[in-house]
Image (spheres, rainbow, N blue to C red):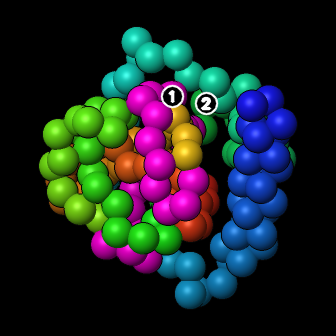
Amino acid sequence: MVLKRIFTAIGVAAAAFALSLSAASPASAVPDVPTPVKSRIESLLVDTALIETALAETAPDTAAEPRTCRARFAENVNHRLQAEAGSAIIGSIPAGTWVQTSCTRVAGGGYTACGLSSDFWMEVYWNGNWGHGAWGCVQDWEFTS
C-alpha cells in the first residue's frame, strides 16, 4: 500500500511537472471558473503528505498565495455529494472536460473505476456545485495559479 502511494505521488508529480512546462502556451488558457474555497471535508483523515512533498516543486512559492487547480477525467465520472461510492450522484462529468478542483486529494470510501481501485477522491466544482470525483479517473491535473 505504501509503495502504491509513493508511485502515485511520483506519477502525479511527473504529470504536474510536464503540465507546468506547457502552461505558458496559449492553448492552456483557463476558462473563467469560481475561485475554490477551503475543503469542506475537514472531518476526514487526509493523507496528503506524500503528494504535497512530491508536488512541492510545482507549488507556488508562498503559503499565503491562494492556489487553484483544474483537472479532467479519462472517462465519464459521477459527481458525488460525498467521497463515498454509495453517495448521492449530483451529476455526471463528461470525459475530457476541464473542471475546477481542490488542489489536494481527500480520503474517503473505496471504489473501483477506470480500471483502478482506490479510496482517494478529488473535490470538484461542476454545474454550480461542489462534490467529489474519483481520483483514479483523473487524466490530467494542474495548478492554475
Residue at 73% x, 26% y is: 49
Q: Which of 68 and 85 is in front in this view?
A: 85
How crowded is the residue under tag 2: few (<14 C-alpha within 10 Å), some, or many (20+)?
few
Identify the magenta region: 94-116
Quarter in which the C terminus is drawn: bottom right
Q: Position of residue 105 (x, y in %)?
A: 54, 38
Residue 38 is at least partly visible in this image: no
Q: Where is residue 107 in the image (x, y as percent from the top left)?
A: 51, 28
Residue at 58% x, 86% y is: 26
State left or right for residue 91 relative to residue 72.
left
Q: Nearer the viewer, residue 24 or 102?
A: 102
Q: What residue type is labelled 2?
A: Ala
Residue on which the image places disc 2 = 64
Q: Disc 2 on helix, strand or loop?
A: loop
Q: Disc 1 on helix, strand or loop?
A: strand
Numbered label tally: 2
Residue at 23% x, 35% y is: 87
What secondary structure is the stretch in magenta mostly built from?
strand
Q: Which circle marks residue 115 in the picture?
A: none
Q: Is residue 120 above or below residue 34?
A: above
Q: In this view, does 2 lie above or below 24?
A: above
Residue 59 is at least partly visible in this image: yes
State left or right for residue 38 relative to residue 63.
left
Q: In which quarter of the image is residue 27?
A: bottom right
State left or right for residue 108 relative to residue 45.
left
Q: Which circle marks residue 107 in the picture?
A: 1
Q: Which of 59 and 79 is in front in this view?
A: 79
Q: Nearer the viewer, mark 1 or mark 2?
A: 1
State left or right for residue 93 relative to residue 110.
left
Q: Is residue 16 above or below residue 134?
A: below
Quarter in which the N terminus is drawn: top right
Measured in 3D between alpha carbons, the distance from the residue under mark 1 to the one under mark 2, in whole angstroms, is: 25 Å
